Image (spheres, rainbow, N blue to C red):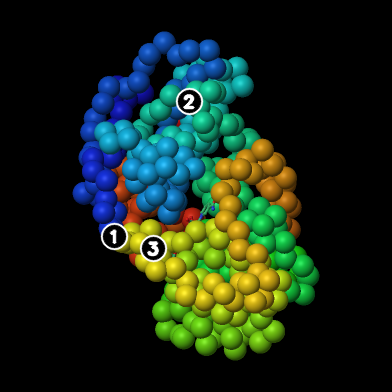
Amino acid sequence: MSETNRQWLLKTRPVGTIGPEHFELVESPLPTPDLGAGQVLVKTLMLGFDPAMRGWVMDEPSYLPPVALGAPMRASGVGQVVRSENPDLPVGALVQGLLNWQEYSIGDPAALIAPTAIPAGVPPNLALGIFGTTSLTAYFGLLDVGQPQAGETVLVSGAAGATGSVVAQIARLKGCRVVGIAGGAEKCQWLVEACKVDAVIDYKSEDLDKRIGELCPNGVNVFFDNVGGDTLEAGINHMADFGRIVLCGAIASYNDETPRPGPNNLMKLVARRIRMQGFIVLDYLARAPEAIAALGEWVAAGELAWRDDVQEGFEHIPATLQRLFDGRNTGKQMLKVADPE
Ligand SMILES: NC(=O)c1ccc[n+]([C@@H]2O[C@H](COP(=O)([O-])OP(=O)(O)OC[C@H]3O[C@@H](n4cnc5c(N)ncnc54)[C@H](OP(=O)(O)O)[C@@H]3O)[C@@H](O)[C@H]2O)c1
């Protein structure tokens, strides 16, 4: 085991686009205290990247406290237990949780998101990807918040991403007609051929508002929005009466320097009796087994397609986060730090 712990610390809070310049790579001594009861020392194997990380570095109240300046950047990950004072998480076990941008971390059962064991045989990429938080977000956001009914039309933005692609496929599996919005021909083609969505809109080359109207002549019953901004405004324009808008995220605005104006058509929500609701997946963690069981059945039946985008190199961690914001990621963004021992 290494005696040092490389870490990426938050150096400054970004204004505008987040980048490697906001982080500092340091080498610290390995955290080797006497572990307390229930604690484990975890070696990071794979890190997950989430657009929400852009919000976590802002010094403002949110659903999680801001990452402190000088602290390792908060991040989800999969690791291997290398020392243990926890009989449920023995040495060698694979765990997932908030491991942060560092090679080693101490997992504490009292932490906000304590490390949990990964079922035997599930590799890190699947634990973080198709069985990870983004899929839980898709499952609960679509089914609990969106409440789609068979035969309804579901519109999904960010549809080729980790969350959006699972939303689109669950909607299809529930008997809905699915229209996906994504950037670029390659992602649109993957949505049609692998995810079997009914129609796609390439927002980078097509008139989004016009195409939603053409593809959803009877209106959109559920709009699962990952993008916000102009995309949200266009979706609102085409909602059917009593439709539901699931506010999952607004990635188009995460790097804005100043708040952008809100949708200019909110009165349509009144006229069409639309429910628009945000949600945070953390509120559903107690029900994770339900989602994972359903996802497992769909995976075993060959009903779900997904893509893992696995980068490599500890030094490339901050640059990898940027891939989410310029759409270079194809599927769940991850970075491999080490192999299991
Ligand atoms: N509410 C929750 O609890 C929760 C939990 C997880 C994630 N989320 C949200 O879900 C969304 C997707 O997250 P993810 O982790 O699954 O990432 P992802 O969709 O795999 O990757 C992000 C994608 O966003 C698209 N994008 C980036 N900038 C854009 C822009 N300016 N306009 C339009 N699209 C843009 C890109 O796709 P294109 O190439 O197609 O542009 C990019 O690939 C985010 O908004 C995230 O904050 C919410």
Residue 190 position in % (x across, y down): 54, 72
Foreground: disc 1 or disc 2: 1
Q: What's the mark number on residue 253?
A: 3
Q: Residue drawn at (49%, 38%), measured in percent from left and top?
A: 78
Q: Secondary structure at mark 1?
A: loop
Q: Residue drawn at (61%, 72%), measured in percent from left and top?
A: 269
Please report whichever mark, 1 or 2, sits nearer to the chain's N-terminal start.
2
- State whether residue 136 appears in this view: yes
Q: Secondary structure at mark 3?
A: helix
Residue 160 position in % (x across, y down): 52, 67
Give the side of residue 66 with respect to residue 234, left or right: left
Q: Residue drawn at (61%, 63%), measured in percent from left and top?
A: 276
CA separation in Å, label 3 and label 2: 33 Å
The quadrant in which the N terminus is found is: top left
* Circle 1 residue: 257
CA separation in Å, label 1 and label 3: 9 Å
On whether ligand 1 comes within 8 Å of the CB at mark 3, the answer is yes
Q: Is residue 4 above or below residue 11?
A: above
Give the side of residue 12 with respect to residue 281, left or right: left
On whether ligand 1 comes within 8 Å of the CB at mark 2, the answer is no
Q: Are marks 1 and 3 in contact (CB under 8 Å)?
A: no
Which image quadrant for residue 23? Answer: top left
Dot 1 alpha-carbon crowd within 10 angstroms: few under 14, some 14 to 19, many 20 or more: few
Foreground: disc 3 or disc 2: 3
- State whether residue 75 appears in this view: no
